[in-house]
Image (spheres, rainbow, N blue to C red):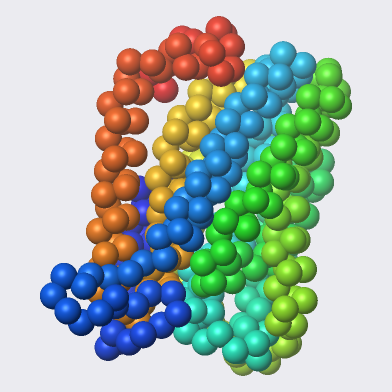
Amino acid sequence: SAPADALLRLSMALSVRTRRARNVSLYRRRDSRPGGGIVVNAKRLAVTLFFTAISETINKLFPLLIIRHAHQALGLEAFGYAAYGIYLVDIALPLVGFGYLLKGSLRASDKASPSHRGELIGKFVAIRLLHAAAVSIVAATIVLAHPQLQPYAPLVGILSFVWFVNAIELSFLYYAEQRLAQLSYYNIVVKAVSLSAVLVFVQDPDDKILYALLTYGTNAIVPLLTFVSGFRRFGLSLPKGSELWPFFVAALPYGIAVFLSGWYDRMDMFLVENQLSAETLGLYAGATKVYQSLLPLMFVLNSVFFSEILGAKNNLAAFQKLLRMSFQANFLVVLPMAAGVWFVDSHLLALLIGKTFATLGPV
């Protein structure tokens, strides 16, 4: 899904209508002399990449540390139960987000007035709450009607609040304003709290629901922080019902791409649990976590450059320069990672999770 996400963000960047280059506060031409070049806010770009890289590293490393502890404390069966319950909630999350992050980032970058931002926040929150409500009804119907899913109903019900909290998150403002470093800081703190809580409170198989809350439920904290920040700065204007349909239609292509990308990334968990057992899923989930922790390193670069490109969309030269920098940075990161993983797969699993998982290197 990371390559799909990269292509999606690239298409978003290329679809931005570039106007005549003009002086803007973030990107500008140095001068008109030959060789004058383009001035990019290199300091902010470097700081954002630094904090986003730390955030993403923690976002992937801490879950691996948590899995190592959970595997020992919960056992494979309880761990597999918790992992599949989280998966059932997580697989529906793209239906709540549905591409509004990308569309909202573009809309917010077009107009920066507080009144426009307040109207945009109102539409954004209202339509995503409708998505969350629809997802909750459909998910409850499917889980309660399917005998194989009924044992997971309590955990899905407890974690379903994540859908509604994510419906009010306003991270698109941070993309539009090139403030991803602050968003990364929030994430670093939340992940540190989550890891500490799991290590202290999760001690035996009876703690499987508590484990799910402390690992997945804490993902609601950052969306809440973004909503409080956005609401305090711009307020919230309640939209008319007739205004939501055009907003939905405009986000529909991105929503379909986001959903298919997320479903592709998660469907293997469903197949393993459906065809085998929770214990096998516990083994497979551990190996998959390591794989997923490596692949989304591209997301760090793509997110930061997507945000910066939004700020440069009125300057064609700066836009092109940032696009080239994005491709070059991805190449430098992905090539050694893709080649090196073939030589360290089993050792990596044994080191990060435990020797039980070493045989799953090929996964």
Q: Where 110 falls versus 89 (above or below)?
A: below
Q: Residue 258 in the image: x percent, y percent?
A: 46, 58
Q: Residue at x 36, y 85 (%)?
A: 23
Q: Residue at x 25, y 58 (%)?
A: 324
Quick check: 171 left or right of 75? left
**Horizontal placement of 12 versus 237: left or right?**
left
- Where is residue 18 shown, x and y percent of the image? 30, 82
Q: x%, y% of residue 154?
A: 81, 41
Residue 253 appears in the figure: no
Q: Quadrant of the C terminus?
A: top left
Residue placed most toward the observer, 321 or 260: 321
Taking the image as shown, residue 266 lies to the left or right of residue 36, namely right
Nearer-the-camera pick, 45 or 180: 45
- Residue drawn at x 53%, y 79% is 108
**Residue 336 in view of the camera:** yes
Work out whether residue 241 or residue 313 is closer to the camera in this orientation and state it: 313
Query: Which residue is found at the position 70% from the left and 73% from the top?
Result: 230
Quarter of the image holding residue 336?
top left
Quadrant in the rendering for residue 325: bottom left
The location of residue 269, given as percent across then percent down, is 53, 34
User: How many marks on residues?
Assistant: 0
- Farthest residue toward the left? 34
Establish if 114 lies above or below 195.
Answer: below
